[in-house]
Amino acid sequence: MAVLSLRRVLLLVGAAASSLVSAQTIVTEDGNVVAADEATVAPAASVIDNAASDPAALQLTDAVIANLTELQLSNISLFAFKSDSTVARALSSARSSSSAATCKVFPGDAAYPSRLIWAVLDLLTGGALIETVPIGAVCYPKSGVYNATKCADILAHWTESDTHAADPTSVMSPLFQGETCMPAAGASNASCTLGGFPSYAVRIANVAQVQLAVNFARNSGVRLVVKNTGHDFLGKSCGAGALSIWTHHLKTIEFVKSVKTPTYEGPAFRLGAGVEVHELYLAANKYNVTAVGGECRGVGVAGGYTAGGGHSPLSSKIGMGADQVLSIDVVLPNGRFVTADESNQADLFWALRGGGGGTFGVVTGMTVKVHPQMHFSGVNFNVVSGPGTNVSEALFWKAAYAYWRKMPEYADKGTYGYSTIFPRGAPGSGYSWSMLPWLVPGMALADFKAMVAPLFAEWKALGLEVTPLWFEYDNFYDTWSKGNFPLEGVANSNLRTGSRLFPASVWKDSTKLAALLDAIKSIVVEGSALIQYNINGKAPAGTPASATNTHWRDAVWYTIIGSAWSAGVPEAEVKAVNVKITDDWMGRLRPFGPGGYGNEGDVMEPDFGGAFFGTNYDLLLKIKRSVDPDDVFWAPTAVGSDRWQVSGQRDWLTLQTGKLCKA
Ligand SMILES: Cc1cc2nc3c(=O)[nH]c(=O)nc-3n(C[C@H](O)[C@H](O)[C@H](O)COP(=O)(O)OP(=O)(O)OC[C@H]3O[C@@H](n4cnc5c(N)ncnc54)[C@H](O)[C@@H]3O)c2cc1C
Ligand SMILES: *[C@@H]1O[C@H](CO)[C@@H](O)[C@H](O)[C@H]1NC(C)=O
Ligand SMILES: *[C@@H]1O[C@H](CO)[C@@H](O)[C@H](O)[C@H]1NC(C)=O
Ligand SMILES: *[C@@H]1O[C@H](CO)[C@@H](O)[C@H](O)[C@H]1NC(C)=O
Ligand SMILES: *[C@@H]1O[C@H](CO)[C@@H](O)[C@H](O)[C@H]1NC(C)=O
Ligand SMILES: *[C@@H]1O[C@H](CO)[C@@H](O)[C@H](O)[C@H]1NC(C)=O
Ligand SMILES: *[C@@H]1O[C@H](CO)[C@@H](O)[C@H](O)[C@H]1NC(C)=O
């Protein structure tokens, strides 16, 4: 079938304006109904180069906008760039700036775009617009999409990150969506609503689609969110009434033998925004290099991970995820596509490396350093106390304290020690501590054993014997994939977490250190889980300055605490858990560590600017105001986010279920 020209299709949409155009089919001049897909609809894009695998091959340009304008299609100004071009200026003269509005435009508002306008967005994006449906809707007989087989499948794979990453809107912290359509077997007549899920999503395959969506959100005043995998712990990748930019399918991984910047010359990967940790590690293994990513399999490397700093099993040796970045491709809030690096858009390059996701624009791809393959050695072990074990609670805590006291020493040697302590049940039933693992990149096993020996000897003297499972590999992929790292489950409901970074300076003051260890212990004794990382996030010499949270740079211990509640318990009980985490437990820890990790932080962190961005916050705010004066981008705890709030929220928990309004 011949590819229809953009002009022809749009004229038809224009002509059909009175009878609603379906987003899925179009009527040609000779009356044929054809599918509106990539093959039939020329998206509103200029072909910049012919490398079809590069999302930047298709871009929205002034010439495209000029063509659209010439068609005199009504509402086309909704897709124009911010008025820094003559074309857009002429177009938007009639429109009042959305920045003056008190709230983002919400479904049901008179100013909310009509279905026809959404259909035009669909056509311009080449059929990439999705009218969203909650992932759990297939479990609800009244939803219109009920399918028991699909429901069973979602339930069977609910705790796997792929289930949520592959869905246009599903997120792995359903709490923030409002849990309005949770999948359940044999669900009843209960209603299934969108809650905090966006109303529309654009499935991104090229830069032009991102530009169209950003321009549309800015010009229409509709809330914009960015979803990559949906791993966010704070509800930053969902939002009621929003248009979502879904970057998951930008999967390019290209190995470049040598990239030269003012501070680096060597091999690199060009990564699409949707590349996940396991895909990066597999590619690194193929090219015999080591790449920096997180410990779990599904986090989006070039999405929220790097934007938030990104801690890695390699960080104590070669820095944070953000320290690996050589250049970043990004669509700005004004709709323009730029590449930021040390020499171009330097402020933006600084801000995008650690200044947080969904704040300064939509990253479509980035180039990151890779390192030579390395040798790894390490250990896994478990310490379990309580009934049925030989480990008393007193012994358990003595062992933990002995380990904690040595954190700066281990971090200095390049350690990554990832472990969890969980209460085994009600008070008195003991604790389970799992090392998942403790390793040092580049260290021989004999040296690793020698490093650990004094701790194990100290434990033995206390009466504790562990069974160490030592390992040694000559590359990272085997270290990561052969069972020494856990496969993490996701999408727990009714769970809240908070995080803290503790600097090495605490260890120089024995009184302060003892108080910190007592505080941590007290929180676990009261029922919190403890996820802990013995890690130091300093930048290697020669790394260009970035916005990575300054608190990572001198940290040697990173901790996540959290607690859950049962579905259906009274609101007072839910409030008690939430207040306890933010005020009581985090309150006990803040005196020892003013910083938290924003990617895994407490959404109610009182001074989120200082905690999640450190001394970088003021400059980040300046850059945010200059790059995004209209607040096209907003996310909870993002830089400058205190100017807006989600309406209808309780003061102890912000969900994404309401209209976004000026604070
Ligand atoms: C099981 C699990 C394990 C984890 N392990 C680690 C770890 O080892 N190390 C670590 O540092 N962190 C880890 N994290 C935290 C993780 O870094 C953050 O959740 C991160 O924000 C995820 O990014 P995403 O793009 O995958 O997720 P999303 O939820 O899709 O996005 C997160 C944020 O980034 C924004 N964003 C996403 N893509 C883009 C884009 N292309 N352009 C602009 N903004 C974008 C979103 O708007 C949102 O604000 C883990 C989280 C989970 C749930
Ligand atoms: C603009 O329209 C003309 C005529 O249809 C076409 O030849 C040209 O390629 C279009 N330009 C862009 C950038 O879309
Ligand atoms: C779309 O165009 C119509 C007709 O010109 C106008 O009445 C309406 O306000 C426009 N809608 C938006 C969201 O700009
Ligand atoms: C339900 O989903 C299954 C699996 O995707 C599919 O094979 C089947 O056709 C669906 N049933 C209906 C009635 O749509
Ligand atoms: C669902 O509604 C129907 C009719 O409204 C009722 O007969 C049935 O008992 C309800 N089922 C459940 C599980 O509530
Ligand atoms: C892989 O890299 C290591 C370290 O740089 C090198 O010694 C080895 O020869 C490489 N192997 C291959 C197959 O390229
Ligand atoms: C407790 O210690 C004894 C003696 O060392 C040993 O035989 C037994 O297996 C231990 N029990 C557990 C549960 O570790």
Image (cartoon, rainbow, N blue to C red):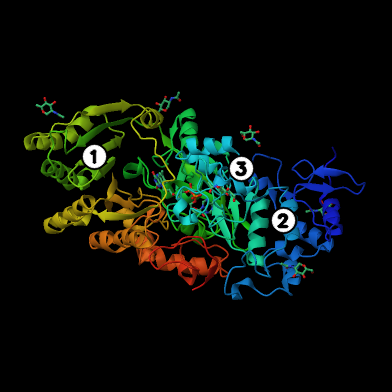
**Residue neighbourhood size for the residue with mark 2, other residues' Cα within 10 Å, grouped as few (<14), some (14–19), many (≥20):** many
Dot 1 surroundings within 10 Å: few (below 14), some, or many (20 or more)?
Answer: many
Residue behind mark 1: 433
Quarter where residue 547 is shown: bottom left
Secondary structure type for disc 2: helix
Q: Which of marks 1 and 3 is in front?
A: 3
Name the kind of residue labelled 2 in the image.
Leu
Give 191 or 400, whichever is nearer the viewer: 191
Residue 586 on image: x %, y %? 28, 60
The mark closer to the camera, 2 or 3, is 3
Dot 3 corresponds to which residue? 146
Q: What residue type is labelled 3?
A: Tyr
Crowding around mark 3 (Cα neighbors within 10 Å: few <14, some 14 to 19, many 20+) is some
Observer-nearest residue: 45 or 489?
489
Q: Which amino acid does label 1 sit on?
A: Trp
Quarter of the figure that contains the N terminus: top right
Mark 1, secondary structure of its residue: strand
CB of mark 2 near ligand 3 (< 8 Å): no
Residue 335 visible here: no
Q: Tell me the number on the disc at residue 121.
A: 2
User: Mark 3 or mark 1, which is nearer the start of the sequence?
Assistant: 3
166, above or below 504, in the image:
above
